[in-house]
């Protein structure tokens, strides 16, 4: 294994029902990069993120994170996932949700995390009393709070206006500078333009980057 192999997929195929969602995907991603999975709706972006997160197993092939199978290793400081729906604990506050992975490990969350995502004024508000965009930014903060080795983000700007897109982009590039491999699935050209590694998916096939 080399540093180029933080996330490595070897001949990954994934079938759901009668549909081959991903076909023979092989790739290798190093730390401290922004990798962007780009492709039309239904091209397999979310499925590929879920395989990297180890919450699904491929039908065939291998998904490795730092040389170990992705499935069965769910430490948040190793691989953190932002799902398409924020999946917050609704009764907890914005700060409690964002800081939860740190509190569970007895670690102090970064003091400026909420401010960087435009959430400082909402820290004490229950998550269920915030907008969808605010919930998404809270979930992004939760994804990044431990500076994970790998951060997987599904459509991280889907519910954001231009001002908040800028905050999200800065949060992603700051994580990359700190050494995180950030993998974002998106249609958003503003993220695609920042990509260190562009991974275009078309109907479950990985195309050569332009
Ligand atoms: N539970 C399921 N059973 C069968 N097929 C599924 C299931 N979930 C997703 N699919 C199919 O797998 C394909 C890839 O879905 P996926 O969610 O990975 O795409 P995506 O590129 O993330 O799409 P979007 O941009 O709309 O989120 C689609 O054709 C979808 O219909």
Image: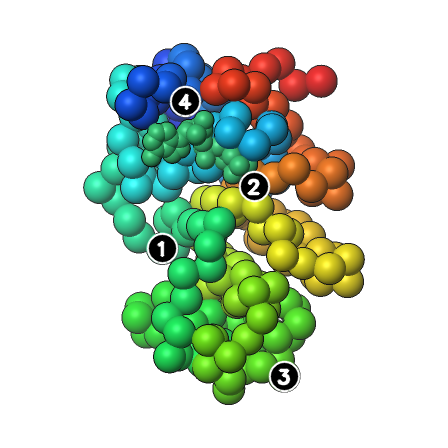
Graded by Cα atoms within 10 Å as few (under 14), some (14 to 19) or many (20 or more), the crowding at tag 2 reads: many
Q: Which of labels 4 and 1 is toward the front?
A: 4
Q: State the separation of the CA atoms marked 3 and 2.
A: 27 Å
Q: Quick check: 115 above or below 202?
A: below
Q: Pointer 1: what residue?
A: 76
Q: Residue 148 vs residue 196: left or right?
A: left
Q: State the separation of the CA atoms marked 3 and 1.
A: 26 Å
Residue occupying the far left of the picture: 72
Residue 121 image label: 3
Q: Say which label, 4 or 1, has the lower sequence index.
A: 4
Residue 184 image label: 2
Position of residue 167 measured from the top left corner of the image (x, y, whole percent): 70, 61
Q: State the separation of the CA atoms marked 4 and 3.
A: 42 Å
Q: Pointer 4: what residue?
A: 21
**Residue 142 appearing in the image:** yes
Q: Which of labels 4 and 3 is toward the front?
A: 4
Q: Residue 35 vs residue 86: left or right?
A: right
At mark 1, the secondary structure is loop
Position of residue 186 measured from the top left corner of the image (x, y, whole percent): 61, 39
Q: State the separation of the CA atoms marked 2 and 1.
A: 17 Å
Q: State the separation of the CA atoms marked 2 and 4.
A: 18 Å
Residue drawn where x is 65% and y is 37% of the image: 187
Q: Residue 142 vs residue 162: left or right?
A: left
Position of residue 180 measured from the top left corner of the image (x, y, whole percent): 52, 47
């Amino acid at each position: 294994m080399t540093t180029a192999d933080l996330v490595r997929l070897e001949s990954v195929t994934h079938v759901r029902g009668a549909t081959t969602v991903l076909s023979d995907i092989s790739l290798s991603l190093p730390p401290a990069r922004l990798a962007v999975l780009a492709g039309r709706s239904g091209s397999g972006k979310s499925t590929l993120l879920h395989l990297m997160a180890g919450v699904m197993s491929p039908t065939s092939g291998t998904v490795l994170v730092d040389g170990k199978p992705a499935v069965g290793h769910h430490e948040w400081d190793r691989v953190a996932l932002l799902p398409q729906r924020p999946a917050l604990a609704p009764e907890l506050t914005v700060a409690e949700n964002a800081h939860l992975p740190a509190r569970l490990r007895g670690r102090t969350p970064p003091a400026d995390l909420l401010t960087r995502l435009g959430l400082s004024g909402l820290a004490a508000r229950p998550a269920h009393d915030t907008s969808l965009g605010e919930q998404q930014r809270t979930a992004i903060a939760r994804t990044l709070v431990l500076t994970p080795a790998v951060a997987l983000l599904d459509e991280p700007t889907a519910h954001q206006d231009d001002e908040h897109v800028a905050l999200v982009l800065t949060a992603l590039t700051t994580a990359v500078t700190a050494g995180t491999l950030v993998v974002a699935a998106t249609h958003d050209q503003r993220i695609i333009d920042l990509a260190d590694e562009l991974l275009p998916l078309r109907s479950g096939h990985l195309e050569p980057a332009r």
